[in-house]
Amino acid sequence: MGPYQRGDHMTRTIRVVGGVVLMMLGVVLPVWAQDATIGFDVGLNSNYNWRGLSLTNKPVVQPDAWLSVYGFTGGVWANFEPTKYDGSNDLSESGGVRSGIAEIDYWLEYARSFTGVDAKVGWVAYTYNKNNAGIDNTSNTSEIYGQLSLSGLPVTPTLAAWYDIDKVKGLYVQGQLVYGVQASPAVTINLGVLAGLSAGQEVSANDPSANFAESGLTHVDFSASTSLAAGPVSIAPSFHFQVSRDPWTKINGADVGNLDKGSKIWFGVTLSWSTSLGATAAE
């Protein structure tokens, strides 16, 4: 699987976070049920695009389960490859040796809203199946992150940054602008433009672990998305056109003809459901 390297495993850290998530589910949930919300999402995407990098170039299923209470949210996310991607041009986290779950991420964040500002800070652990022939468990790593969004403006700007605290030990910054177009009283089309920047997650002489080949602008992503309600389920389709700058973001397949693509297209739909546990307990 491609040139991306993410650092060594961090078993002790993952066990700690796993314990925190279990504590939230087993202890906090019964005590704080009146103020807790649980949710499930599943993304059905044409490929797995992570920060402009094609980690797979074929369809993936990406479920996420989360619990939110008093501003804290903890969750577990996975990347599932439904079939064995072993063609000559296939990119796959599993390396084409198997189907199934190739990656599981654990995340924990705290969010607050102020007048005109939405803020969050968090932590995410990336873990990979030890049986992968592409990105395996020797690439396990984790990041801390922060994000600020301004609301109440014609255009919604968001600035986010992630710092790898394991082996890559570098910063990735992402800026985004989103403009909502009212297509109908019930439907808003969100037009977005996003730019990524590597400030330490690139290849260096001192550290072979990296997410990008070079420092600076990694890619620019133009997107269109919306959200529709179908009873208790939210259906959110999205379409992306990416202009790639970093050499690794230009890789769109394993054969020679797909190693220097200046642009790529990907799309998908996310199904979401959530409920207040307090409301459930009261019924």
Image (spheres, rainbow, N blue to C red):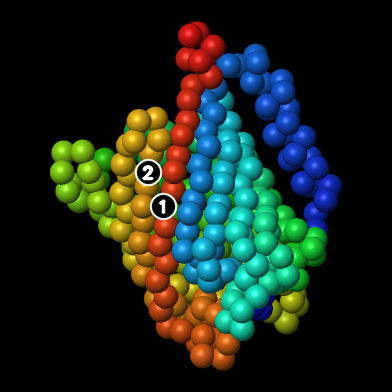
In terms of secondary structure, where does tag 2 sit? strand
Name which quarter of the figure residue 87 lies in. Answer: bottom right
> Which image quarter is the N terminus in?
bottom right
**Residue 21 shows in the view:** yes
C-alpha gap between disc 2 and disc 1: 7 Å
Q: Residue furthest front?
A: 83
Q: Is residue 175 above or below residue 11?
A: below
Residue at image point 50% right, 8% down: 282
Q: How many marks?
A: 2
Mark sitting on residue 235: 2
User: Where residue 135 sits: x, y (%)?
Assistant: 71, 68
Mark 1 = which residue? 269
Q: Is residue 13 left or right of residue 37?
A: right
Q: Position of residue 180 (x, y in %)?
A: 24, 50
Q: Residue at x 79, y 63 (%)?
A: 131
Q: Is the C-beta separation of discs 2 and 1 under 8 Å? A: yes
Question: Is residue 6 something one can see in this rendering?
Answer: no
